[in-house]
Amino acid sequence: GRWRIVEMDVWDSDFLDLVEEAHLTFQGKFDGEIAFGALKGFLDVRYGTRDGSACAEFSWEGHDENDPSCGRGWAMIGTAGRLVGHFYIHNGDDSGFVCERG
């Protein structure tokens, strides 16, 4: 489903919705999308467990400020039904994030 990115460690909330509403979306068995700031990526997702909890691990490719970009990340259900995880840009920044149901 669709999750709204509400918080990231590296980028402030004003930046998150720069181009479109910041979100992380899981679609079907292996697909998804992430968007925040000027970045938009398409996910290749694998589901499993991490520390005994359900987890989604993904690689992604897309663009950041119109430049090709790629990376990886993971997400799992945290406290209060929120989705928590970490997002990595290949040879670039990385950040923890928190999402709420969209």
Image (cartoon, grey):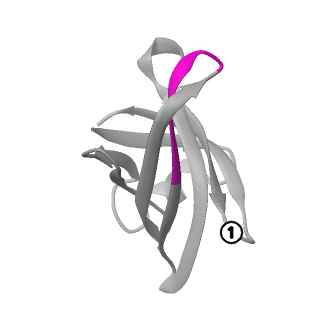
The range drawn in magenta is 51-58
Residue appearing at x 60%, y 64% in the figure: 71
49 and 61: which is toward the camera: 49
Please say whether residue 17 is visible from this viewpoint.
no
Quadrant containing the C terminus in the rendered view: top left
Percent across and percent down for residue 24 are 40, 48
Q: Residue at x 49, y 56 (%)?
A: 16
Report which residue position mark 1 lands on.
Answer: 90
* Residue 56 part of the magenta-drawn span: yes
Identify whether 49 is placed above or below 86: above
Residue 51 in the image: state x and y as whole percent: 65, 19
Say whether residue 11 is left or right of residue 45: right
| Main SS, magenta residues | strand
Asked whether residue 53 is drawn in magenta, I would say yes
Please provide percent x and percent y for residue 13.
53, 49
Q: Quadrant of residue 1?
A: top left
Mark 1 burial class by Cα count in 10 Å: few <14, some 14-19, many 20+: few
Whether 101 is drawn above or below 12: the answer is above
Q: Percent position (x, y) of residue 52?
A: 60, 15
